[in-house]
Image (cartoon, grey):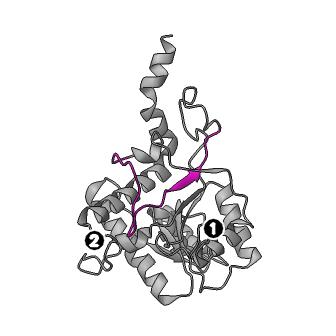
């Protein structure tokens, strides 16, 4: 009886020690959740949430992963380290993030998190060969305050192309924009490059294809926005791209080793 009373007292003490926000923190770390940046623009934020909900459904249907509900984050104050991936739709109409907010994103990336920037403007560039869209200009302003590594379009042998599905490209609601990732240390020498980004996953991904727009579904699971062009398979490929990205986030080094085992074995025999 004495031990039971002691344990009961300890449980109450732990409950009394709980701080505001602890319940939410426990929820955030108990399941893998994909986060998205709250831009303050209701239309953009609602599509981001619907898009990540659609991707979450697809992940549960096609893989053993069972993510929790997507989380909208305020990069100025919310804890970011709970999330392996943060989707950031670039909206030039939204306020420019403060230096402090960008510094928090920079720290998140330096500590192993990945930000997927999506300008959603593949068909929105201005007139002229050197013109850029407002969203691309905003992204440049943001990246100018981050420690961004050298980037390259996803190469054909990158782990992202085969982390779950075999994918030659990464479409969203639009198609045509490459998916940019951190460049490998020796991108110019494919012969002597057994593993890409061997120290970990890329801290940054960039697209203009509007991933969330392709993933977005209503409460019945029906698509909210058409793909451009109107190709039903493009949406499937977009969802598969999302799955590959998540698998890469969670198992990057392991998948990289698996993919290149034949190359490594061949070299061991030389």
Q: Is residue 31 left or right of residue 230?
A: right
Tell me which residue sits at (34%, 45%) in the image: 166
Secondary structure beneath dot 2 equals loop
Q: Is residue 8 visible?
A: no
Q: Is residue 189 magenta?
A: no
* Labels 1 and 2: the sequence-earlier one: 1
Residue placed most toward the observer, 93 or 110: 93
Start-end of magenta stretch:
164-185
Q: Is residue 177 magenta?
A: yes
Tell me which residue sits at (52%, 40%) in the image: 253
* Residue identified by numbered label 2: 230
Label 2 crowding class (10 Å Cα cut-off): few <14, some 14-19, many 20+? Answer: few
- What is the CA distance from the residue labelled 1 to the residue labelled 2? 28 Å
Residue located farthest toward the front when viewing the structure as drawn? 128
Tell me which residue sits at (53%, 29%) in the image: 194
* Residue identified by numbered label 1: 130
């Amino acid at each position: 009886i004495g031990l039971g009373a002691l344990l009961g007292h300890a449980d109450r003490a732990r409950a009394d020690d709980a701080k505001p926000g602890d319940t939410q923190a426990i929820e955030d770390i108990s399941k893998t959740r994909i986060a998205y940046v709250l831009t303050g623009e209701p239309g953009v934020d609602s599509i981001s949430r619907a898009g990540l909900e659609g991707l979450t459904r697809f992940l549960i249907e096609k893989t053993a992963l069972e993510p929790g509900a997507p989380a909208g984050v305020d990069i100025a104050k919310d804890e970011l380290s709970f999330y392996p991936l943060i989707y950031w739709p670039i909206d030039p109409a939204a306020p420019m993030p403060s230096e402090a907010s960008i510094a928090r994103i920079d720290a998140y990336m330096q500590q192993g998190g990945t930000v997927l920037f999506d300008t959603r403007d593949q068909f929105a560039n201005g007139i002229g060969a050197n013109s850029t869209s407002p969203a691309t200009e905003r992204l440049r302003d943001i990246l100018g305050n981050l420690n961004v590594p050298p980037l390259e379009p996803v190469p054909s042998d990158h782990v992202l192309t085969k982390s779950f599905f075999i994918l030659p490209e990464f479409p969203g609601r639009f198609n045509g924009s490459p998916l940019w990732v951190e460049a490998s240390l020796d991108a110019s020498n494919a012969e002597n490059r057994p593993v890409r980004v061997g120290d970990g996953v890329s801290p940054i991904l960039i697209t203009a294809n509007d991933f969330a727009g392709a993933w977005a579904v209503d409460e019945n699971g029906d698509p909210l926005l058409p793909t451009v062009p109107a190709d039903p398979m493009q949406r499937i490929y977009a969802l598969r791209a999302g799955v590959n990205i998540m698998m890469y986030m969670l198992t990057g080094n392991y998948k990289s080793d698996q993919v290149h085992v034949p190359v490594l074995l061949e070299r061991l025999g030389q």
